[in-house]
């Protein structure tokens, strides 16, 4: 084989290897299109939702109700969770009061602050004890405190206790609606 053919053959071979690699990496169909292939990476052009953490002592009622109410009020605008400084279990009367508004807490469970971490845009404490015991969060975190009565501490008959949970649910609903409206005005 003459040596003058080796140069052009090497160029053709390199071109074929490149075409094979391109076909294998992005697929011939995507390569032939004018649009970019879809990536498994998240779309960074959309802003990430703001994150909100509700905190109370036991993460059994107030913070759980607030979490569910904000999800309903704001849809996907916020990434929402709740936690407790000394978590126990979800209170059955909180579930009952929320179900009266068509909101299920069936998938909820009590979580500790250690479990949810400290990277939040907003941390809203809903009880005075949690406000006192709440740890420090990152510098970008906006901390708010809403002093809300503990419905689980209400004595009396089951009907009286359920009424306390309803009052707390309704108070949290109003606070969250106002807070979401305020956030929209600032946007």
Image: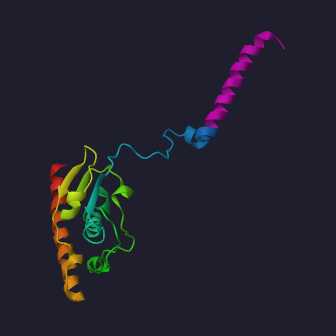
Q: Residue furthest right?
A: 1
Above or below, comparing residue 43 to residue 78 in the picture: above
Magenta highlight range: 1-23
Tell me which residue sits at (24%, 77%) in the image: 152
Assess whether residue 22 is covered by the magenta stretch. Answer: yes
Asked if residue 31 lies left or right of residue 66, the reply is: right
Above or below, comparing residue 47 to residue 84 in the picture: above
Above or below, comparing residue 48 to residue 80 in the picture: above
Assess whether residue 58 is covered by the magenta stretch. Answer: no
Q: Give how far across and how far down residue 151 sits, in percent.
A: 21, 76
Which quadrant is the N terminus positioned in? top right
Tell me which residue sits at (28%, 58%) in the image: 53
Q: How is the image coloured?
A: rainbow
- The quadrant holding residue 179 is bottom left
The kind of secondary structure the magenta stretch mainly shows is helix
Q: Give how far across and how far down residue 41 sits, in percent.
A: 46, 45
Q: Nearer the viewer, residue 116 or 36?
A: 116
């Amino acid at each position: 084989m003459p040596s003058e053919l080796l140069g052009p053959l090497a160029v053709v071979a390199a071109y074929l290897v490149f075409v094979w690699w391109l076909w294998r990496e992005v697929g011939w169909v995507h390569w032939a299109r004018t649009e970019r292939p879809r990536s498994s990476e998240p779309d960074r052009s959309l802003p990430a939702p703001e994150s909100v953490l509700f905190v109370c002592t036991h993460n059994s009622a107030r913070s759980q109700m607030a979490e569910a109410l904000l999800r309903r009020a704001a849809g996907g605008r916020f990434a929402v969770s709740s936690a407790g400084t000394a978590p126990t279990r979800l209170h059955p009367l909180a579930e009952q009061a929320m179900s009266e508004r068509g909101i299920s807490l069936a998938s909820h469970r009590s979580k500790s602050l250690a479990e949810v971490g400290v990277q939040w845009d907003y941390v809203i404490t809903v009880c005075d004890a949690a406000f006192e015991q709440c740890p420090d969060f990152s510098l970008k975190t906006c901390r708010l405190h809403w002093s809300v009565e503990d419905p689980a501490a209400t004595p009396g008959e089951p009907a009286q206790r359920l009424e306390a949970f309803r009052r707390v649910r309704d108070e949290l609903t109003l606070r969250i609606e106002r807070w979401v409206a305020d956030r929209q005005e600032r946007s």
